[in-house]
Image (cartoon, rainbow, N blue to C red):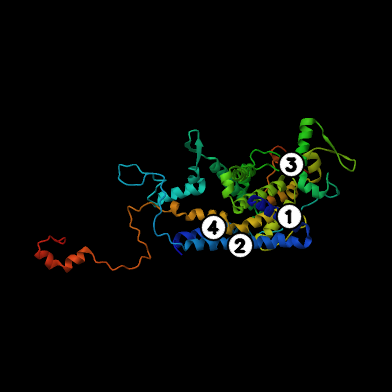
């Protein structure tokens, strides 16, 4: 049900895009108004959500440790998995953000003959996730060729490396392949296992299918139903230079691609995709495990009136002396 | 808001990155409008209609190369009955002689670097 609903939603979006490209009066709406609205919703929604999250206090360290904590000098500590310094935390965060280190530790459990529980490694989710995320980032940056004039050299260099195999014309980008392969794996993985299917919501399938739709319409436009690329760049440049225009020559296939991209941007702040910002705010990853070195005081603890031993001793000093009880002070 | 000293710079960095095309284009001061091409004088008809050529020229050139170099089929019969040689240098550049005024304009604008000129050279004109 969840997957059919998601599929239907993406299908409706594609149909809307087709309509937007075909009906003359709608081309400006779908080519300019909706993209502006989507970008605004994306930026405002993302900033709102991060600030909302930042209102949650994290007064204490929450160490989920995967290695030896720093203790005595002769016990070897795990500086990246259980850092106690800011530098160590930066290392752990970099590995988390760039290489999904905690996902790499993903394990699978099976019940074998016996019955006997067996744990094994499971790197497929990590590998597909890494391939998908990196490809998507490179494709996103590559698209800056439509939003910049003149096109900066590093984008041309990126395109050159990405199309290094020179397969077909226009050349096939390897990241396009990796993106579709990664997404296909992530999608089928949810359908494959009954347990995983049981816990999968429409909110899990929809982003996968939406991004798959973006990728496939893009590949379709590049390699099969061509559209006027100069017109596409004029449209994109019009948006970023605030002089919007929708050239006649831009075909419906582009509008299908565009409506899916706009949906992705507008949907982003309200979905699980916000893990893009959230990963930076993970308390279990971005706080040093220095509980044994630094005293972390809860900032909103109420003032408690304390009566220390020193004060007590001072108060009953004469009685303690009379009873010949030794004083701390001496 | 807690930890603002980390979160605010992070958000600002994100906003700058995501809006980079706005600043870049403002600094470069180029217009959003694409290039205008100089079409050959005297000729009114390419090997295919203009719209098809826009989308398919790279595929046609690739097919022509394979057919001419590998299969020895060196001539293309135009729908109007005339015959053209499958040759980038003689046929394509025969009309579109100045590639700086034709090929390069759109390719530069769209950020495309065709590898035609890895092997071919531009014929010298009088």
Query: Residue beneath label 2, please?
Result: A41
Asked if labels 1 and 2 touch by Cβ distance under 8 angstroms, the answer is: no
- Badge 4 crowding class, 10 Å Cα cut-off, few under 14, some 14 to 19, many 20 or more, is some
Question: Which mark, by number, is residue B122?
Answer: 3
| Image mark count | 4
Residue extending farthest top? B71
Please, what secondary structure does the residue beneath circle 1 have?
Answer: helix
Taking A69 as reference, is A300 above or below it? below
Please, what secondary structure does the residue beneath circle 4 have?
Answer: helix
Taking A124 as reference, is A231 above or below it? below
2 or 1: tag closer to the N-terminus: 1
- Badge 1 crowding class, 10 Å Cα cut-off, few under 14, some 14 to 19, many 20 or more, is some
Q: Nearer the viewer, mark 2 or mark 1?
A: 1
Q: Give me the chain letter of mark 4.
A: B
**Where is residue A179 shown, x and y percent of the image?**
62, 45
4 or 3: tag closer to the N-terminus: 4
**Where is residue B114 shown, x and y percent of the image?**
70, 43
Query: Residue beneath label 1, please?
Result: A15
Q: Nearer the viewer, residue A95 or B34?
A: A95
Q: Report the Cα–Cα distance between label 4 and label 3.
A: 45 Å
């Amino acid at each position: 049900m969840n997957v059919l609903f998601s599929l239907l939603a993406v299908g409706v979006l594609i149909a809307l895009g087709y309509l937007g490209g075909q009906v003359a009066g709608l081309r400006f709406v779908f080519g300019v108004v909706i993209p502006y609205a989507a970008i605004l919703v994306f930026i405002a929604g993302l900033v709102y959500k991060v600030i909302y999250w930042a209102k949650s206090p994290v007064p204490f360290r929450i160490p989920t440790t995967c290695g030896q904590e720093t203790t005595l000098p002769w016990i070897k500590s795990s500086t990246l998995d259980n850092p106690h310094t800011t530098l160590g935390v930066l290392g752990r965060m970099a590995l988390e953000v760039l290489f999904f280190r905690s996902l790499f530790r993903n394990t699978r459990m099976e019940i074998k003959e016996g019955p006997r529980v067996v744990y094994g490694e499971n790197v497929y989710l990590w590998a597909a996730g890494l391939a998908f995320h990196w490809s998507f980032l490179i494709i996103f940056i590559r698209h800056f060729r439509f939003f910049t004039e003149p096109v900066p050299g590093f984008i041309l260099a990126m395109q050159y490396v990405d199309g290094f195999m020179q397969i077909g014309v226009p050349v096939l980008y390897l990241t396009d392949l990796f993106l579709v392969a990664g997404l296909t794996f992530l999608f089928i993985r949810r359908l494959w296992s009954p347990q995983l299917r049981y816990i999968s919501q429409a909110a899990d399938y929809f982003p996968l299918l939406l991004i798959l739709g973006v990728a496939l319409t893009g590949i379709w436009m590049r390699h099969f139903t061509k559209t006027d690329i100069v017109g596409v760049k004029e449209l994109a440049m019009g948006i970023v230079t605030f002089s919007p225009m929708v050239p006649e020559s831009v075909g419906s296939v582009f509008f299908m691609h565009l409506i899916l991209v706009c949906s992705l941007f507008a949907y982003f702040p309200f979905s699980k995709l916000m893990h893009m910002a959230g990963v930076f705010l993970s308390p279990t990853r971005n706080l040093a495990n220095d509980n044994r070195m630094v005293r972390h005081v809860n900032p909103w603890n109420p003032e408690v009136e304390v009566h220390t031993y020193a004060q007590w001793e001072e108060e009953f000093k004469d009685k303690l002396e009379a009873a010949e009880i030794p004083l701390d002070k001496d | 808001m807690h930890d603002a000293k980390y979160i605010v710079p992070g958000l600002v960095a994100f906003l700058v990155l995501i809006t980079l095309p706005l600043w870049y284009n403002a600094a470069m001061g180029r217009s959003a409008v694409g290039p205008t091409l100089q079409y050959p004088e005297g000729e009114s008809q390419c090997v295919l209609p203009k719209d098809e050529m826009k989308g398919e020229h790279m595929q046609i050139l690739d097919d022509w190369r394979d057919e001419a170099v590998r299969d020895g089929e060196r001539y293309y019969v135009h729908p109007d009955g005339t015959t053209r040689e499958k040759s980038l240098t003689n046929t394509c550049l025969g009309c579109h002689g100045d590639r700086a005024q034709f090929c390069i304009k759109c390719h530069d604008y769209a950020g495309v670097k065709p590898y035609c000129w890895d092997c071919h050279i531009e014929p010298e004109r009088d």
